[in-house]
Image (cartoon, rainbow, N blue to C red):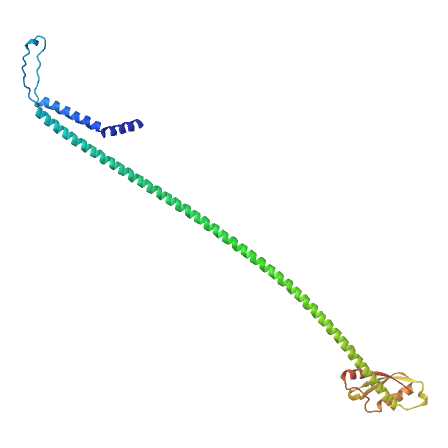
Amino acid sequence: MAIKMHLHQWWQRYIESSFALSISAHALLLLGLVVSVSVAPPQQLNLDMTPLTDQMPVLNATFIDPAVTQAKFDESKKQAQQAARAAQQEKLRQARERKRQAAAKQKAQRLAAEKIAREKAAKEKAKADKIRQQRELERKAQAALAKKAAQAEREAAERLARQEQEAKDRAREAKQQRELEEQLAKEQAQMQAQETQRVMSEKQRYSVLIKSTIQRNLITNEAFKGKKCQLNIRLGIGGVVLKVDKIAGDDALCRAAINAVYKPSNLPVSRDPAVFAQLRDINLTVEQ
């Protein structure tokens, strides 16, 4: 196959060369001469060559008209040239056609290759875009998770800080409350002590007044000297005697003391409710 193609290429180069054109022209000329000799009528030529008759044979030759031969040669040459030009033009046309087809084929191949390259590039670009989009989505997802984790951590830290601050505030408030309560309790205790002292002082004073009133109303008797009587007196509002009971002591002195308690319409009592509450039920010792 390679030898055949090589011979074909050699033959193409040969027929397209000027040497082949010259050979074709001479071959056509020779063909025309042969045809002219065959067609032209034979003419006899008598030569007088006496001295040589014995030595040379007789030759019979045919005369060819030069003008006719030249015209035929020119016509044959012209036809050959026209045929050669036609063949050359056909070869050129075929060569141009082959070149055009080769160029068209190359262009089609180039366009197909470019199309394949474009499609491949488009696919690679789409693949790269998809990978980039996927990576971008992953990056955004990771960023969102990191942001969410940071937000949760920040909120947890803030919540812990608030809780610690609230605990500190509660502890401070509780301390302040305890201190306030202690201060109030202390003040109340002081006030209560003062009030108690005042009430007891008032109770003591009115107890002395009540005892003095009873002593004044007690019947004097020499028999009562050196004796004592302990009484429980219950008083109502305004010093009204509600009940008198003997606790201990001399019976005669106690009877006289009880009469002395009932003798006044009212015993002296304080209008202060706190002091009066201490005088509603008192124990007194009467002596003479």
Q: Is residue 58 above or below residue 107?
A: above
**Quadrant of res 32:** top left
Residue at 95%, 88% in the rendered image: 223
Instruction: Identify the residue at horizontal 58%, vertical 57% (top origin).
Output: 153
State the residue lying farthest toward the right. Answer: 222
Residue 64 vs residue 209: left or right?
left
Q: Is residue 69 above or below residue 275?
A: above
* Camera sees residue 233: no
Q: Quick check: 118 left or right of 203?
A: left
Q: Quadrant of the N terminus?
A: top left
* Image spot of residue 267 (x, y percent): 82, 89
Q: What percent of the width, then of the height, locates residue 158? A: 60, 61
Which residue is drawn at the image coordinates 84% and 90% (left, top)? 262
**The one of 266 and 125 positioned closer to us in this rendering:** 125
Report x, y in % for residue 53: 7, 9
Which quadrant of the figure has residue 17? top left
The residue positioned farthest toward the top in the image shown: 54
